[in-house]
Image: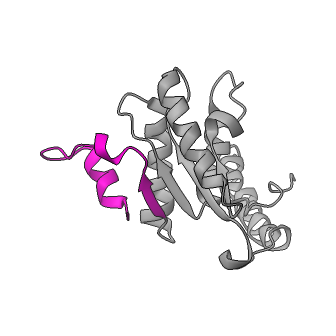
Amino acid sequence: MPRPPAGGRGILFAVIYLRASLNLAQTRLRVLYFGLASAFYTKETKVSERKRRVFVICPVRNADPEVVSKIEAYIKKLEADGRTEVYWPYRDTDQVDPIGFRICCDNGQGIYRADEIHFYYDPKSEGSKFDFGMLFMASAIIGPKKKVVIINRGEVIPTEGKSFANVLLALATE
């Protein structure tokens, strides 16, 4: 049986691995294994004893170079204090993936481990919508609630009725 990813709880890895399992009894044993194994492979520390972890949700594929430059400048400011560790998929996720499945897994782990999510909202970005769904699941459904900061807050306009923009504005805790 494979070992959960180093340094992580292995939850997302376990869920993906379990989906491939065909036998219900084997699935139950694997859930138990990953639940127990993650306790041994993960060293939890208080947030005050480690760097603040920030995950940036933003356009990556076909991203406008001007937007990339804005986000890069924003990240440099965050990292300049020496107390913030930023996971930026544009820089930190290997984008060579013919299907995109591993990219989704890597970003899901990053979102799960992050203390805060900083979001550059672009309604045309498909990957951002997927990451937004993982953020919603991790923060609003599973918990604990994560601090959400909208990087381009002035560009996110509330709409009449239901929209991703309205959900993002509701999640943001600026």
Q: Nearer the viewer, residue 128 or 133?
A: 128
Examine the image and state in which quarter residue 169 appears.
bottom left
At a point 72% along the width and 24% down the height, the residue shown is: 96
Q: Is residue 62 above or below residue 159?
A: above
**Residue 32 within the magenta-colored segment of the rendering:** no
x, y (%) of residue 42? 80, 69
x, y (%) of residue 139? 47, 63
Q: Nearer the viewer, residue 92 or 38?
A: 92
Q: Name the image colouring.
A: one colour
Residue 164 seen in render: no
Q: Is residue 136 above or below residue 48?
A: above
At a point 63% along the width and 39% down the height, the residue shown is: 89
Q: Is residue 7 above or below residue 105?
A: below
At a point 23% along the width and 43% down the height, the residue shown is: 157
Residue 120 seen in render: yes
Which quarter of the rendering shows the C terminus?
bottom left
Q: Nearer the viewer, residue 141 or 112?
A: 112
**Residue 171 within the magenta-colored segment of the rendering:** yes
x, y (%) of residue 60? 55, 29
Q: Which residues are magenta?
A: 147-174
- Count every numbered label the image shows and give the total: 0
| Name of the residue lying farthest toward the left | 160
x, y (%) of residue 81? 66, 60
At a point 34% along the width and 51% down the height, the residue shown is: 168
